[in-house]
Amino acid sequence: MTLLRRDDPFAGFGLIAEIGSLPDLEETLECALAAYTAGFDALKIQLFDWQQLITADAPGYGAKPGLQRDDFQGQCLDHESLVDLQAYCSEIGLILFASAWDEQSVDLCLALDMPLLKVGSGDITNELLLRYIGNCGTPVILSTGASYMWEIERAVEWLGDAQIALAACTLAYPTPACYACLNRVTAISAAFPGFQVGYSDHCQEPWIVGQAKKAGAAFVEAHWTVNPGSGGDSDFALHPGNADQMFDEPETEDHWGPLVVEPCEVELAARRNARRSLATRLPLCKGDRWQMNDLCALRPGTGVPPFEWPRVLGRAALRDYETGELLDPQESI
């Protein structure tokens, strides 16, 4: 395995095991060892404060119905466990990094000296978070599921001078193989010459990993578990029992998709509910003027888009708001 080289911030990330936000350190360490044994180069976790990510009633968008808070409450490792995980990954030769979904989680990644950050597809319109990450000086992988090419271009602009790699992706959990859209790797590579372009996989079929490499992906991120079928992402994740099938040849060719980058039908629910809207960080009374400290961005993305914040600042609130409420669309008109 190739460890990270500082002259190339994305070196050594051929295969990335995404284990999500397991709150149990013992299971996380077991996942790490199993991923290393299976040939993965890096381990990716998710860090967030759920109250800075979703509203209390944000609907789900995967195969599992219900509210997003049912999946996100209490789902992250504490700081002490993160330090232990980082030490263990360093000992066995895995690169550890994270998707950070709020500014405090970004700061935690920086404090732990993680070599890069991941931005999930749902935050591709979250201008404030992208600008914050772009100013950190840490390399970034930007996932692009459920997006149009112009949205990717805008997000890259918001990330400023950061060193950026892009990940083609179909934002559906799980993704049917016929919607893997591996040709997005080619399309994004053509639109962003000089950028490393990888693939973030949400399919149940292990062979999508090898096919993504065949498509030219510089790296492939795949969900990984040691407890297949235990619910959530583990129901479609790779695991030690099928990891040896990652480079098998499929019997069909319908996983390539068109040479365009635009949302497909299986991504529409995630495009709506995994993206964010402007929301209240603090309670606000009708008539109070909106200030930057009053605003945050929360899921779902059914309200005022986060990049509309300049249209809101300085205006008088049209009604009373509690903490964590989406702004009414009229607040930006």
Image (tube, rainbow, N blue to C red):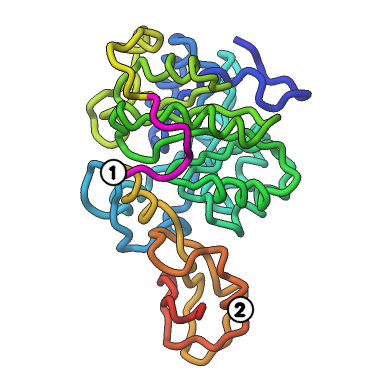
| Residue at x-position 35% and y-position 8% | 249
Q: Is residue 264 magenta?
A: yes
- Gap in angstroms between the C-alphas marked 2 and 1: 34 Å
In the rendered view, would you say 231 is above or below 211? Answer: below
Q: Which of the two labelled residues, at mark 2 and mark 1, occupies the earlier sequence position? A: 1
Q: Is residue 195 magenta?
A: no
The residue segment tinted magenta is: 256-265
Q: Which residue is mark 2?
A: 313
Q: Which residue is mark 1?
A: 62
Q: Position of residue 212 (x, y in %)?
A: 46, 20
Left or right, 321 with reference to 119:
left
| Residue at x-position 63% and y-position 28% | 196
Q: Position of residue 305 (x, y in %)?
A: 49, 64
In the rendered view, would you say 247 is above or below 61? Answer: above
In the orientation shown, which residue stands out farthest toward the right?
7
> For residue 166, which quarter of the picture?
top right
Q: Position of residue 56 (x, y in %)?
A: 33, 63
Callout 2 secondary element: loop
In the rendered view, would you say 44 is above or below 238? Answer: below
Q: Position of residue 71 (x, y in %)?
A: 31, 46
Residue 34's disc is none
Q: Mark 1 belongs to which amino acid?
A: Gly
Q: Mark 2 belongs to which amino acid?
A: Leu
> For residue 2, which quarter of the picture?
top right
| Residue at x-position 32% and y-position 52% | 68
